[in-house]
Image (spheres, helix red, strand yellow):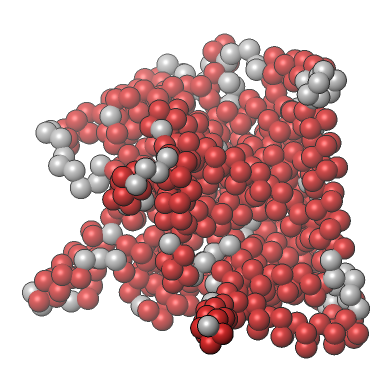
Amino acid sequence: MAAVTATARGTATSGVLGNPLVRKLGVLLVLAAVVVPFAASRWGSGAWPGALTVDVSGPLGTVSDWIVDNRDSHPLFLYFLGHVSNAVVIAVRAVYLALLAVGWAGVTAVAALTAWRVAGIRLALGTAAAFLACGLLGMWVPTMQTLALMVVAVAASVVAGALLGLAAGLSDRMHRALRPVLDTMQVLPAFAYLLPVVLVFGIGVPAAVLATVVYAAPPMARLTALGLRGADKEVLEAVESLGTTARQRLLTARIPLARKELLLGLNQTIMMALSMAVIASVIGAGGLGDRVYQALASVDVGAALAAGIPIVLLAVVLDRVTGAAGARLGDAPAPHARLLGACALAAAAVVAVAGRLTGRLEWPESWVVVGIAEPVNRAVGWMTAHLYSGVPVVGGTADWAGRFTTWVLDPLRDGLQWLPWWSVLLIVAALAWLIGTWRTALTAVLAMAAIGVLGVWGPSLDTLSQVLAAVAVTLVIGFAAGIAAARSDRVERLLRPVLDVFQTMPQFVYLIPVVALFGVGRAPAVAAAVVYALPAVVRITTQGLRQVDPAALESARSLGATGAQQLRQVQLPLARPALLLAVNQGVVLVLAVVIIGGLVGGGALGYDVVFGLAQGDLATGLVAGAAIVCLGLMLDRVTQPTGRRATKGA
């Protein structure tokens, strides 16, 4: 009996030690026992030690001064960057003048007829209504300015992204080289692109367009490479057997087979370019984004909303049109499609010429609806008086924001900043290694250590506390809504239009309602981040739960499992990869808006970036931007399981 007991104990012990998670934790404990006493005795156990900090403000200041001093004289600027800047200005101005020359009626007709040709009469009517609404709100000219910037930026982004994707799709070496670059660009918030571009090109349209191109090109590159590398091997072999050259195979087989991915890349590029074009108003892009930014700076919610509505309408129209084009790709063309398209183009030309002949190119001032800014500001005033504070029992929105800051954000920030620096690195290493590999853990630890080396340990932990709080709220609400949508078709239908609108709204627009409800501070930045990240979390959760094998659910039902038991014991475990992806995307999206929250009092790294932009302080802004990159990379690695690990968990 004793022998049997000993054998059982030995089996249990070997089973525990055989667990990969236990082995990883054991290795980390041994490593910590060796490294931590040495690090604590050498550098202390408080915040990041000053001895391990590198002051880069001097070199960055020198670089900034050199660029400013040589911007008008150095050959690099005179014969290359200057020509790039001039070409961007000329292109944007040409598109803008063309839009003005066509007139409001011509632009509306062309947009509506394009939507009709691509997706049918319903979307055509919606497109026409969206453009007319921009005019009725008195925002026609700013809308055309934003549209001109968008046309040039999207064209350049598509060309650059397609070329990079083409190289990555045809070359394994190029694909391996580009992958870490695109990964970094994916987690880099949009704000971090602005300062280096401003330093080189100055404030204005060229900097805005080029920052937009850098931000919007990666999805086109990724999806182009995905489409080319995923082309049907049998089709390619059949084409090759006909004696075609590599160029012929590319043009006649690979690219046609990747059309859906290319159109999806175009859709994503357009949405990211619009989002960045609005953010780029901080550096002089003009248009609708500038109106929103100026209104937010003066806390004029009505004016911000008047400019924000056309942005949302433009985003929804562009998303729907490009999405419909991708969905209908490959369908048989309708009878007389070319004739109908030619008639539609002729009708648009007639409308444009009629507008020019009658002198109605500009939107008539008499057609502008009485500005909505004043009624909205009155409504905000009423909310401030009745909802902002002093509401019986539940308290007002300002009270909620204050309590959230006092009870959640402050303790979380203080707790993170109280932790010894080496313990933060150990926690990051443990989380990254448990969910991934030792390479993942090493990357995450090095990224976190780089933040300390740059000397922004405290502000980065402040930003991290906001991200963690926003992610927790996002996941609670997002998982609950996703589960409800997965279990009820009616709930999914009700949520779909709301999620569609939220998903197409640029990041900047989310700041408008939170400023109206919560004022300024860290809590509004967290609220905006939650609303921005929710659609992705809800959609991924719903899709993951709906894709669970029906046979597994049927088996659970046959055993008498209740709906709650099926959810806990079958759906959630089998949907684990999708849920982990939802967590990862929630973290990345939250970080993007928490940084922009620096404009409404979010502080920390977001404030440093805004300050660097406003003052032209390369050292402050660029160091904060680099810290944001490192923080985003760390969070991405900690929440992104390897394919093998995710599959095993499923």
Image position, residue 603 (x, y; %): 81, 50
- In the picture, measured across the screen, residue 85 lies left or right of residue 463, that is left
Give the residue drawn at x 90%, y 86%.
42
- In the picture, measured across the screen, residue 254 lies left or right of residue 546, that is left
Residue 624 seen from this side: yes
Give the residue drawn at x 44%, y 22%.
129
The answer to whether residue 314 is above or below residue 468 is: above
Image position, residue 206 (x, y; %): 60, 54
Give the residue drawn at x 74%, y 57%.
464
Displayed quadrant of residue 244: bottom left
Residue 285 seen from this side: no
Image position, residue 237 (x, y; %): 15, 74
Give the residue drawn at x 79%, y 46%.
408
The answer to whether residue 310 is above or below residue 31 is: above
Displayed quadrant of residue 479: top right
Between 16 and 23, the one lying in front of the other is 16
Residue reaching furthest left?
A: 242
The answer to whether residue 274 is above or below residue 430 is: above
Where does the C terminus fall, quadrant-wise?
bottom left
Image position, residue 191 (x, y; %): 67, 54
Between 563 and 393, the one lying in front of the other is 563
Displayed quadrant of residue 493: top left
- In the picture, measured across the screen, residue 381 lies left or right of residue 287, that is right
Between 358 and 366, the one lying in front of the other is 366
- Number of numbered discs on residues: 0
